[in-house]
Amino acid sequence: MKTRLILTSSNHPLEKKFKTKEFKSIEVDPVAIWELDGSDFEDVDIVYDFTCFDRATKLDLLEKISHLHEGEIMTDLTTNWGDYFIEHYPQITAAFAAAFYSPKNTIEVYSKDVEAYEEVTDFFKSIGMEVENTNSVGICFTYPRVISMIINEAYFSSEEKMATNEDIDTAMKFGVNYPLGPFEWAQKIGHDKVILVLDELYQVTGDPRYRVSRSLRMQM
Amino acid sequence: MEIKKVLIVGAGTMGRGIAQWFAQQGVKVELVDAVFEVALAAQELANASWDKLHAKAKFNEKEIASFKSNLTPVEISEHSNDCDLVIEAIIENVDIKRELFQKIDMNMKKECIIASNTSSIPITTLARELSQERKTKTIGLHFFNPAPIMKLVEIIETTWTDKQLTKDLFDWFSKRSKKPAVCKDSPGFIVNRVARNFYGESLHILESYDQDKVEEIDNVLKNVGGFRMGPFTLMDLIGIDVNYDVTQSVWKSFYNDPRFRPHQIQREMVESGRTGKKVSEGFYKYEN
């Protein structure tokens, strides 16, 4: 039986699940990562990182973990340039995008090998979630990227007073059968996370197509 | 608002679907097409569709008989001039549509509303040569395929559209099981604009053609995002050429804003003739 330590952040949608006695968990304060120390990682086989941070903070955190822990790291890279992290931290054996609400209660998961895949799949099943296997992480996985762009466009449309938010939600649900309208979706996911994804895409690619609309940023 | 008689111009897939839906609402529908036989064939298809719905017990015999009697194909030179609403669903050509609108403006009773089902041409462009009074009654009514089933109707206002007309149409459709959404006369309206990046961002993730990655992206967006179909399956169904045309049209209308930029994979697919299910090959291969 492997011992798991779960790191969470207060903005992560699964944070509450790990606040029970069943899990050994620590909530990470993004401005006090230095507070983590070796005793937190004693006898830990796998670190599950369920924090949702920007790239600089995530880098600080993974740097700290890799100094304090020699075993595997399975990390949430929903809002980060996953390929970069996987390349630079060999301890990462699996990465996932669990910080975005899924209408199907399913998480995109990347794993380096079969053992890591089985571990991470079993773990998500144990907390009542399904996984969808992916062969690459890219920048911010697939679903977070696509839905963030759709939400951003809805905010651009609203900013231009092209239609009301309610009418935009209606149109997308009843014209193309989206499970939620983009504004409803943004509420479920959290505007902060959508902005983190778009900012990361903009910073990594330098492509202005990822510019965040003012009205979306205004939600913060 | 009373809509008792509607003229639908264009008996292709959309025109037929719209005609069928109006007939089901108890509205008298005249269906015309440049080629009368097309209108006749559309009536036959609508009748066959109603017979199927009857067999499935969705409607009773009396209702089906009423629907059928409400829909009449008419020679284009013989349609009535006392319709309450005209909806055009003809070819997406601005000159042909403008000419049609001007003819309708001259011949139809002055209270008649003129609407276009266009998905890409600004309604303002179609309305600007019309009489001042008619301009206030000119609007976009964008239905989605299949029109009798899909609930959305985008109601598109121009700068001249009477606000009360918009409100009345919103209420009229709402009472008849449609879900109307009002929008300004802006490129792509709501759906074709906001949904652009369902395809566009998926193509950016794909970067270069890779069959495994195509399937992976489709699966993720279906199984994680809850979309009915993945973007590549949907592009195959719509027609990659059709989707590419819409992308280019929206991109140009937004002065080449990079948010709407087409992707080179789209161009490669179109240039190689792999335009989707209709030719048995697109992002996937299909049996004939």
Image (spheres, rainbow, N blue to C red):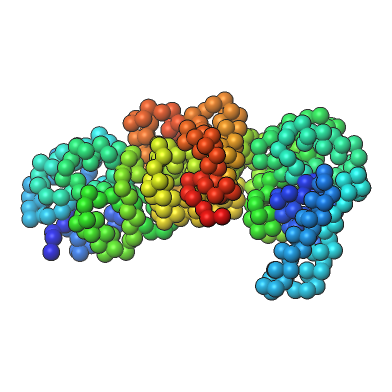
Measured from the top left, where is residue A98 in percent x and y? 32, 51
Residue pictured at 45% horizontal, 31% vertical: A209
**Total number of numbered discs in the rendering:** 0
- B217 sits left or right of A163 in the view: left
Residue pictured at 82% horizontal, 43% vertical: B34
Quadrant in the picture for residue B127: top right
Residue pictured at 22% horizontal, 56% vertical: A114
- A113 sits left or right of B171 in the view: left
- On screen, A48 above or below A66? below
Measured from the top left, where is residue A39 in percent x and y? 7, 50
Residue ranking furthest to the top: B255
Is residue B193 among the parts visible in the rendering?
no
Quadrant in the picture for residue A80: top left
Quadrant in the picture for residue A35: top left
Residue pictured at 38% horizontal, 46% vertical: B213
Is residue B280 among the parts visible in the rendering?
yes
Quadrant housing the N terminus of chain A: bottom left
Measured from the top left, where is residue B30 in percent x and y? 84, 53
Measured from the top left, where is residue B180 in percent x and y? 66, 50
Quadrant housing the C terminus of chain A: top left
- B177 sits left or right of A156 in the view: right
Q: Nearer the viewer, residue B14 or A213?
A: B14
Residue ranking furthest to the front: B288
